[in-house]
């Protein structure tokens, strides 16, 4: 059973009990080794993500060494951190005394040698395997044998990164979600060499940050982003089939998602996913695969960062419908000879959810996650899935095998089994 026996009564009692049970279960593993103390943490990379990670470590009582390649970038990162801390003060989450303490605990440096005393170093640099490998070669030079090195990569193969280290067992993935000082989820990804001590320590650190750790085995995109890619593929394809940008976002937010999927792409930067996808061969059987997003990037529409993406953004940063974005997508659909249709909101929601559910089953069957409920925690804590619906896999269990099979049969008829392969929904029973 995907939902083990001790979850059956919880599933029957309702969604709130299930969600609480699922979160408790995320680190329910048997480890013979204990965690080691972590006092000083190095953060390499002072961009938006690195600064956000540094801020949450400061507010959790750690001493933080922030590293950048030059003083200008470093100062920008420090400014971001101070802004996050001041915002926490204004919201009443920290006191004036704590603000001063946290600021004194931040050490901004440009020399990797300053990291030699850290028990944990987290890299949050550009999402490029060659750039990260170059960094790990530097860390080989300065880190002691007891230092834990964590990568915040959201897609890349951490086993390849581990091979660069003198002691590959030092590396672990700690994938924070943006913005890290707000989002509660951290995917903890052991490599093939990661020791139990390092795994236990990473889990302990995440808990000390008041976040939820979920252990995920390595694959492209890990659990959350791999599912989000599958979900995104259906959203992108529906654009090519005739659904409008606003229609798709409204359908998903009206259903309960915190943000529409296309608004999310604009927020995170459309070019980020574009670069990740193009680091691997695109599927030949799927000519429309993320073509809408590719069109945005190829026409200089990167999202909020440059004021135009799937939406246009006015001087106040508010999204407004973009005739240009719609035109680009429509013209591409004609070029690809994709038949157009009229979508209803329920049809959009069902198709998007089926993408999540089927990819979630794949993740479990491949051993990427330990239990199906871990997938629900990932989506509740990292992607704004509505809590009252329990997560995509909980929702699937409530839909029942008969309805799931019927929906899958319809989708297979429309798009073929290469896109929608057979699934054994019986294991959700």
Image (spheres, rainbow, N blue to C red):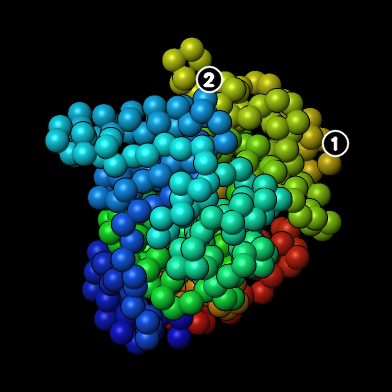
Location of residue 394 by image quarter: bottom left
| Residue 410 higher or lower than 318, as above or below | below
Q: Could you say where residue 256 lies in the image, as x and y percent from the top left?
A: 38, 47
Q: In what quadrant of the picture does the N terminus appear? A: bottom left
For label 1, the crowd category at 10 Å Cα-Cα, with few meaning under 14, some 14 to 19 and many 20 or more, is few
339 relative to 192 in the view: left or right = right
Res 365 quadrant in image: bottom right
Mark 2 and mark 1 lie on one chain; the one further toward the N terminus is: 2
* Callout 2: SS: strand
Q: CA distance from mark 2 to mark 1?
A: 28 Å
Horizontal side of 36 relative to 91 (left or right) equals right
152 or 148, nearer to the observer:
148
For the image, the number of numbered tags is: 2
* Quadrant occupied by the C terminus: bottom left
Q: Is residue 304 above or below residue 279?
A: above
Residue annotated with mark 1 = 335
Residue drawn 45% across the image and 27% down it: 75
Residue 313 is tagged as 2
**Residue 232 place in picture, x, y as percent:** 60, 49
Q: Secondary structure at mark 1?
A: helix
Q: Nearer the viewer, residue 399 or 56?
A: 56
Q: Is residue 34 above or below residue 60?
A: below
Question: Where residue 111 is drawn, which disc sits there?
Answer: none
Of marks 2 and 1, the one in the foreground? 2
């Amino acid at each position: 059973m995907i939902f083990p026996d001790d979850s059956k009564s919880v599933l029957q009692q309702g969604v709130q009990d299930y969600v609480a049970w699922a979160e408790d279960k995320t680190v329910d593993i048997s480890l013979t080794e204990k965690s080691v103390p972590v006092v000083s943490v190095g953060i390499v990379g002072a961009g938006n993500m690195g600064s956000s990670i540094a801020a949450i470590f400061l507010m959790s009582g750690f001493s933080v060494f922030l590293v950048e390649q030059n003083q200008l970038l470093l100062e920008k990162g420090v400014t971001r951190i101070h802004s996050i801390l001041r915002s926490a003060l204004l919201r009443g989450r920290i006191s004036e005394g704590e603000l001063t303490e946290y600021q004194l605990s931040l050490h901004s440096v440009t020399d990797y040698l300053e990291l030699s005393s850290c028990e944990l170093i987290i890299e949050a640099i550009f999402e490029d395997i060659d750039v990260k490998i170059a960094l790990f070669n530097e860390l080989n030079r300065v880190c002691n044998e007891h230092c834990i090195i964590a990568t915040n990569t959201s897609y890349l193969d951490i086993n390849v990164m581990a091979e660069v280290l003198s002691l590959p067992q030092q590396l672990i993935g700690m994938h924070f979600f943006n913005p890290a000082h707000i989002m509660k989820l951290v995917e903890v990804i052991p490599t093939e060499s990661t020791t139990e001590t390092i795994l236990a320590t990473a889990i302990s650190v995440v808990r000390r940050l008041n976040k939820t750790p979920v252990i995920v085995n390595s694959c492209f995109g890990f659990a959350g982003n791999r599912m989000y890619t599958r979900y995104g593929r259906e959203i992108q394809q529906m654009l090519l089939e005739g659904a409008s940008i606003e229609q798709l976002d409204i359908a998903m937010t009206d259903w309960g998602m915190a943000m529409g999927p296309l608004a999310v792409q604009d927020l995170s930067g459309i070019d980020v996913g574009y670069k990740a996808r193009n680091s691997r061969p695109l599927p030949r059987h799927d000519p429309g695969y993320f073509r809408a997003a590719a069109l945005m990037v190829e026409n200089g529409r990167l999202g909020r960062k440059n004021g135009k993406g799937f939406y246009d953004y006015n001087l106040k940063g508010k999204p407004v419908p973009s005739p240009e974005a719609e035109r680009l997508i429509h013209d591409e659909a004609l070029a690809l000879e994709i038949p157009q249709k009229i979508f209803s909101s329920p049809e959009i929601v069902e198709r998007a959810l089926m993408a999540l559910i089927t990819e979630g089953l794949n993740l479990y069957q491949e051993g990427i996650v330990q239990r199906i409920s871990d997938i629900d925690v990932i989506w509740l804590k990292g992607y704004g899935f509505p809590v009252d619906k329990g997560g995509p896999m909980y929702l699937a269990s409530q839909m029942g095998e008969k309805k799931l099979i019927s929906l899958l049969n319809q989708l297979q008829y429309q798009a073929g089994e290469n896109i929608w392969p057979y699934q054994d929904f019986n294991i959700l029973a």
